[in-house]
């Protein structure tokens, strides 16, 4: 693994003693008011302990979900996107005594401003160690978080007014918002331990030990073109899943597949042409066709790619059939790889989990490879579908779980230091 760029300011070089430390974390793990998977929260325990050990006073903040209506600008607040379950979890696990301030909320525009005076009573308690920390409301409840205007500038200044220094440890929160980007220029700022760890492991993807197998999926082909192109250049073999694989199959075999846009098929055609010479795509020869986006008895079937008929219209391909992994050619490549990067689920696992479960099981059989898993659905499904492999992986250094799948793909396309919140930390230090 490569060393951290010396231009990046690090938390271990900040003097935290007696300082209020505003830390941006990625605790975006709440779904409909309940914690879906606490992995991202647990990954920041080291940061929280370090701040306390070094004599600092922590203020944490995270976003939860998508709260802003892009058309109207209205912000939806309420229990479904509250940080309350996160605070309850932290206080139960760490006995941390975190408290969330109650701030005025406009029913349509969210929290209009963060008034530093409103936090003075809590800040006084924090500095006397009467509470363990402050946990701000969902950053996306603040009107200036995503607005990219004067409200964003004002909010970043308000963040700076309540703390002495800023630490970004939210690798998965890669979009440039007030709490991840603008605030870095307002006070002494640094990268937390998790961001440092993620950058170091990204080097294993950006400079992999061959043979390198990359696995990518997604619901829209056009959103993955950049990282997919970069990965194609680096990889020895590329395995596709989801709608991305559907678009590839439609382009290669001249078929139509329900739910796949013609524009995606045209874009996938470029990859088909490129692969005619390189032969890097590891094709899985069986898919599950369903009459609808669901699983109804008698309404789905396995279809072989060798039986595709040019011009034929097929229903929804919702999974890679598990028997695809009976092919010795496929298993030999998986077992022979020295680096495996996975940012994919094979299908719509809500209804058809079998393909993903079989793939994860095959990956787990390779003891030699560095196995690097992106965050989001990939990690959640690995845990649900193959819990034995997941639990074993937690104590196995050959596995690594990133906390943000989107951030990893962004880094593959632009480099780790091209992620805008990380670049903002460097800019603030120069």
Image (cartoon, rainbow, N blue to C red):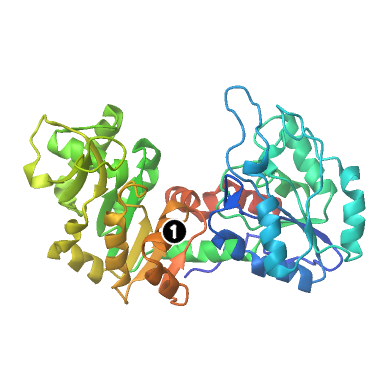
* 164 or 302, nearer to the observer: 302
Q: What residue is at 45 percent from the left and 63 percent from the top? A: 203
In this rendering, position of residue 47 left or right of residue 34: right
Can residue 28 be seen?
A: no
Number of numbered discs: 1
Residue extending furthest toward the top: 72
Question: As drawn, is 366 to the left or to the right of 33?
Answer: left
Helix, strand or loop for disc 1: helix
Give coordinates of residue 185: x percent, y percent: 73, 47
In the image, residue 6 sits, relative to residue 315, either above or below, namely below
Instruction: Determine whether 383 is above or below 260 in the image.
Output: below
Would you place residue 398 above or below residue 312 in this image? Answer: below
Specify whether 354 is left or right of 131: left
Nearer to the camera, 311 or 351: 351
Q: Which residue is drawn at 92% across and 51% down?
A: 121
Residue at image location 74% in from the left, 30% down from the top: 150
Left or right, 231 with respect to 174, comes to: left
- Image quarter of residue 369: bottom left
Q: Where is residue 170 in the image (x, y as percent from the top left)?
A: 61, 55
- In which image quadrant can residue 118 be found? top right
Residue 317 is situated, as x and y percent measured from the top left of the image, at 24, 41
* Few, some or many residues within 10 Å of mark 1 (<14, 14–19, 20+): many
Which of 264/354 is in front? 354
Q: Where is residue 406 in the image (x, y as percent from the top left)?
A: 47, 48
Extreme-front residue of the structure: 297
Residue 371 visible to the viewer? yes
Look at 80% across and 36% down and name the residue there: 113
The residue carrying mark 1 is 379
């Amino acid at each position: 693994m490569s060393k951290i760029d010396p231009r990046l300011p690090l938390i271990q070089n900040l003097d935290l003693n007696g300082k209020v430390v505003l830390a941006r974390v990625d605790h975006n793990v709440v779904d409909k008011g309940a914690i879906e998977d606490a992995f991202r929260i647990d990954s920041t325990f080291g940061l929280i302990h370090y701040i306390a050990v070094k004599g600092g006073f922590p203020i944490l903040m995270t976003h939860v979900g998508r709260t802003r209506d892009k058309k109207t600008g209205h912000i939806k607040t309420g229990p479904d996107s509250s940080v309350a379950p996160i605070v309850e979890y932290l206080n139960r696990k760490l006995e941390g005594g975190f408290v969330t301030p109650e701030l005025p909320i406009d029913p349509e525009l969210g929290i209009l401003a963060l008034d530093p005076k409103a936090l003075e009573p809590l800040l006084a308690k924090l500095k006397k160690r009467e509470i363990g920390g402050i946990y701000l409301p969902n950053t996306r409840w603040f009107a200036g978080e995503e607005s990219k205007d004067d409200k964003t500038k004002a909010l970043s200044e308000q963040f700076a007014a309540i703390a002495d220094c800023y630490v970004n440890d939210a690798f998965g929160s890669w979009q440039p918002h007030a709490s991840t980007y603008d605030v870095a220029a307002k006070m002494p700022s640094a990268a937390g331990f998790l961001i440092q760890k993620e950058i170091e492991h990204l080097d294993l993807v950006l400079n992999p030990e061959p043979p390198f197998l990359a696995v990518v999926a997604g619901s829209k082909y056009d959103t993955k073109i950049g990282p997919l192109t970069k990965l194609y250049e680096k990889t020895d073999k590329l395995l596709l899943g989801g709608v991305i694989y559907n678009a590839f199959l439609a382009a290669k075999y001249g078929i139509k597949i329900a739910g796949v846009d013609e524009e995606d098929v045209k874009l996938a055609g470029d990859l088909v042409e490129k692969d005619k010479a390189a032969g890097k795509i590891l094709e899985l020869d069986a898919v599950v066709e369903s009459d609808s986006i669901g699983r109804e008895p008698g309404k789905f079937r396995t279809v072989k790619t060798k039986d595709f008929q040019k011009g034929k219209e097929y229903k929804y391909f919702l999974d890679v059939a598990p028997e695809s992994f009976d092919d010795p050619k496929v298993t030999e490549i998986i077992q022979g790889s020295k680096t495996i990067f996975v940012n994919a689920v094979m299908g719509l696992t809500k209804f058809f989990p079998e393909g993903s479960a079989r793939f994860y099981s095959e990956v787990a059989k390779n003891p030699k490879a560095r196995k690097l898993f992106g965050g989001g659905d990939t990690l959640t499904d690995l845990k649900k579908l193959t819990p034995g492999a997941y639990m074993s992986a937690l104590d196995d250094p050959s596995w690594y779980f990133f906390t943000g799948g989107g951030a990893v793909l962004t880094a593959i396309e632009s480099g780790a230091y091209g992620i805008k919140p990380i670049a903002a930390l460097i800019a603030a230090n120069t």
